[in-house]
Amino acid sequence: MLTYDLTGATNSLYKCLYEYIKADICRGILEINRKMPSKRALAKNLGVSTITVENAYDQLISEGYMYAIPKKGYYVADIADIRKVKVPIPISLDIKAPEQEEDFAFDFSSNRTEISNFPFSVWAKLMRETLSLQEKKLLEPSPCGGVKELRLAIADHLSSFRGMRVDPNQIIIGAGTEYLYGLLIKLLGKDKIYCIENPGYSKLKQIYESYDVECKLAGMDHQGIIVEMLRNTQAQIAHISPTHHFPTGITMPVSRRYELLSWANEKDGRYIIEDDYDSEFRINGRPIPPLQSLDACGKVIYMNTFSKSLTSTIRISYMVLPEQLANAFYEKLSFYSCTVSTFEQYTLAAFIRQGYFEKHINRMRLHYGRKRAKVLEILRQSFSENECRIIENDSGLHFILVLNTELSDKQVKENLLKSKIRIKAVTDYYMDRETKDQHQFILNYSNLVIEGLENAISEMKKALQP
């Protein structure tokens, strides 16, 4: 009869018994096809319950160390094909994961939103209501484009806020714009040439190239992307940010928008991806109508996200496809599952439908307007007109400081880093070549803490000294 000492067991008794028997089988002490004691007999011999033995046997059978023959008993299995695994030991592999960002005393380059501005109480209330009222729907698979309630809510919001007439079935929801870019590449084709603005969002180039897509650059003037340069790239897809370009802050005038639409209509297969990121935060006047609202030929793919208007961690974005592309999407890519949980989709739908989103945007506009004015006031008090010029516009949450200095952009940044202050230059966003210093630096104010800003500006003045 098998005998094991279970008195010193640190785990549950059945786990301890399982480990003992498994070890004996692996070492060959219990040979192949040997009949094991019955549960009752082994339990009596060890002084434990039959449930303890039954649980140990069941675990060994499920892992292939034993097998059972009805009405005959339990037997040791042939484990020749079962890989013998040594007891795990601590390991340290040479894996170079990205390090966490350094903690800066002041970060003028951060575009995150303030934690205190997220409507936690409202969101928590709507989440509870969603759990209570949408109990059955929450556990149903989401349609590939997202739940209907959220697509309807977004369509209504776009109609009232952006003047867009959108069929909810044109809207595709995904976990972040980066995921949606991947879907677009699959929809439009890897054989196309994609063109992005230069300077611009360098991550876009990385995303396109990671999909083995040819990505080219077109320069910009004071009105936005230069259409002639776009035409020279031979691109079929233009990816632009006409409402508020990053980093320059340019808002594309209507004349350039029609010029772009003319380019798109010159040949079949040409499309414009309009990234409307940051469009909600126009400080003065109404938001500029999107390029999509001028498009009469189904050439514009509109994209936006709730990352800036709510919080960067919410990871809910959407795109509005022209009719022919929406039909192609449902025909070719409807097997993809929506990557946003139904819990968050229904909660966001209620947040928009019940008017909380509009109230939040209006509140944040006032908040950012006051903050912007305060930041500009401190800058103008700290710098003379000879030392600094401010390039600002009515949209978005950043502006540009033009510093009068003999130092290179790189030297200014390095001097500030010594005081644990981070700032980025416009030249950091050129992707094709070394660019001549412009002494233009980007100041994102969405996450700035006003307290301490004067000290940070003082350090900036010191950093400008040769």
Image: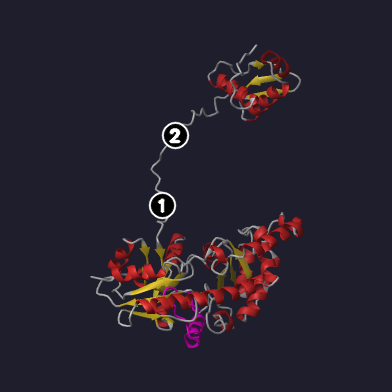
Tell me the CA gap for discs 2 and 1: 21 Å
**SS under mark 1:** loop
Whether residue 23 is visible here, answered yes or no, is yes
State the quadrant of the C terminus.
Answer: bottom left
* Foreground of the two, 233 or 28: 28
Whether residue 270 is visible here, answered yes or no, is no
The kind of residue on which mark 1 rests is: Glu
Coloring scheme of the render?
secondary structure
Query: Circle 2: is it few (<14), some (14-19), or many (20+) Cα within 10 Å?
Result: few
Query: Circle 1: is it few (<14), some (14-19), or many (20+) Cα within 10 Å?
Result: few
Q: Which residue is mark 2?
A: 90
State the quadrant of the N terminus.
Answer: top right
In magenta segment, residue 357: no
**SS under mark 2:** loop
Q: Which residues are magenta?
A: 239-265
At x 53%, y 83%, the residue is 284
In magenta segment, residue 247: yes
Q: Are marks 2 and 1 in contact (CB under 8 Å)?
A: no
At x 60%, y 79%, the residue is 162
Figure check: 38 above or below 183: above
Mark 2 vs 1, N-terminal side: 2
Figure check: 118 above or below 379: above
Q: Position of residue 309 (x, y in %)?
A: 56, 70
The kind of residue on which mark 2 rests is: Pro
At x 67%, y 67%, the residue is 351
Q: Position of residue 173 (x, y in %)?
A: 61, 65
Q: Which residue is mark 1?
A: 99
